[in-house]
Amino acid sequence: MALIKRTGTGSWECVAVAASYQAFVNRSNRAPKTLSDGRELAHDLLEAAGELTDAQVTLVVADIPLARGPILGRRCADREVSKAYGGQGCATHSPSPKRPGLLSEQLRDGFQERGFHLATSTDALASRYLIETYPHPALLSLMNVDYRVPYKVTKTAKYSPNEDQPRRMKKLLDILRGIRGELSDKIAGIGCVVPETAETFSDLKQTEDKIDALVCAWVGMQFLDGKVVPYGDESAAIWLPQRQA
């Protein structure tokens, strides 16, 4: 979870970043709840955001499949992103009724109840939006690279199968610091998201989650500046930064 705001000078500032719902809510001095419904989760996140800043929240960016109706399988949005980015190692997974399941519909409905309109490829103007993005292809634009950034903690052995643990750890930390550096050039106040060292790869999972949240926030910045495009149709869209010619 990341909360950023535009300052009076037009730059962007990080208000809070956390690896989970519980940690984000803790930042606002609210007690995390045991939530069984995505509607409650959406409402609680917005309440926590309201306590962390006096700026009005106008955009929510989510790294989860979202649609205006039930998600029954692979969507047009998934096919379009895979067609555009599959050759760069950034094809999408296939959603199903079980995953993301009801959570997706509940989150959509919860944010909609608070005035956030799910933006797809055909939209009327709204004052508040909920959009879906996908960090892997977004990182291609952020990092100006041509192939999937290998920053996922659980896949280090796959990325470098012939290297030992210390070398894989160093390589992963260097990649995470590189992403953090690019984000820091665009968002002030991120802080020390990436540690100097880590004993195990699992110790870096929270770092990965924070990076994902900040990448989503950066995509949101691009959305508000009109620099993203929707992949999908009127039922669902994945919003990604415009590709450079």
Image: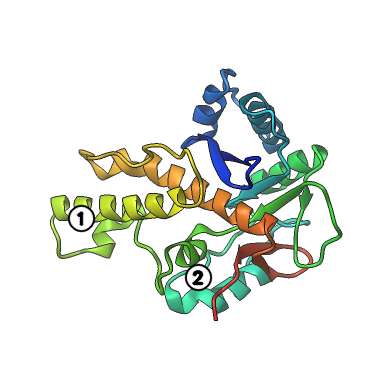
Q: Residue at x 78, y 46 (%)?
A: 128
Mark 2 residue crowding within 10 angstroms, few (<14) / some (14–19) / many (20+): many
Residue 187, percent from left and from top: 51, 46
Mark 1 residue crowding within 10 angstroms, few (<14) / some (14–19) / many (20+): some
Q: Is residue 194 left or right of residue 190?
A: left
Q: Residue at x 45, y 79 (%)?
A: 87
Residue 60, percent from left and from top: 67, 46
Q: Is residue 70 above or below residue 74?
A: above
Q: Amino acid at mark 1?
A: Arg
Tag 1 residue: 168
Residue 220, percent from left and from top: 62, 52
One can see residue 1 in this view: no
Tag 2 residue: 91
| Residue farthest bottom in this picture | 245
- Mark 2 vs mark 1, foreground winner is 1
Q: Is residue 232 above or below residue 220?
A: below
* Residue in front for this viewpoint, 191 or 154: 191
Q: Is residue 177 left or right of residue 23?
A: left
Q: CA distance from mark 2 to mark 1?
A: 24 Å
N-terminal of the pair, mark 2 or mark 1, is: 2
Q: Amino acid at mark 2?
A: Ala
